[in-house]
């Protein structure tokens, strides 16, 4: 099954891309037996240094998309802080790996983006069933 993401710069396209990336990074599959959602952020983060660079870049991409939506500096700084905090935690061996299960910066940032979109671009809302 091939999934095609929209490439436009309109709010609905940005929302679809950010939601897909957050799902991939934070909740793409579940750990058998404990039913905990895990994504590539936790797995890639296991690779010392390089994993942290990659996950930080992907988190920064979400903030960049938020900037493209015209979000306020306060919101962007808050989102950048989430990515930075996740990055700093990730640099600590073992602690950072465990923190990926608790502090999900991409999920937090998606929540900030959705709140902005729901207020300023309500036509982008997706009713989930």
Image (cartoon, rainbow, N blue to C red):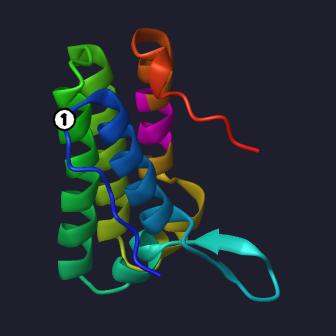
| Residue 45 seen anywhere in this rendered image of the structure | yes
Q: Is residue 98 above or below residue 109?
A: below
- x, y (%) of residue 123? 47, 20
**Relative vertical location of residue 121 with respect to residue 77 in this rendering, above or below:** above
Residue 97 lies left or right of residue 47; in this view the side is right
Q: Nearer the viewer, residue 62 or 46?
A: 62
Q: Position of residue 18 (x, y in %)?
A: 36, 47
Q: Is 99 in the magenta? A: no
Residue 30, by quadrant, is bottom right
27 relative position to 58: left or right: right
**Quarter assignment of residue 110:** top left
Residue 112 sits inside the magenta stretch: yes
Which residue is drawn at the image coordinates 37% and 54% (left, top)? 86
Relative to 76, does residue 82 appear above or below in the rendering? below
* Element type where label 1 sits in the image: loop
Q: Which residues are magenta?
A: 108-113
Residue under the point 36% across and 41% down: 82
Q: Residue furthest right?
A: 33
């Amino acid at each position: 099954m091939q999934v095609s993401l929209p490439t436009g710069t309109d709010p609905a396209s940005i929302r679809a891309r950010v939601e897909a990336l957050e799902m991939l990074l934070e909740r793409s599959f579940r750990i058998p037996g404990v039913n905990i959602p895990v994504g590539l952020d936790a797995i890639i983060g296991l690779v010392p240094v390089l994993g942290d660079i990659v996950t930080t870049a992907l988190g920064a991409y979400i903030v960049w998309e938020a900037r493209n939506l015209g979000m306020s500096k306060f919101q962007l700084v808050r989102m950048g802080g989430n990515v930075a905090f996740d990055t700093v935690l990730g640099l600590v061996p073992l602690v950072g790996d465990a923190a990926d299960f608790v502090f999900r910066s991409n999920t937090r940032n998606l929540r900030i983006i959705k709140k902005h979109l729901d207020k300023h671009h309500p036509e982008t809302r997706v009713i989930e069933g």
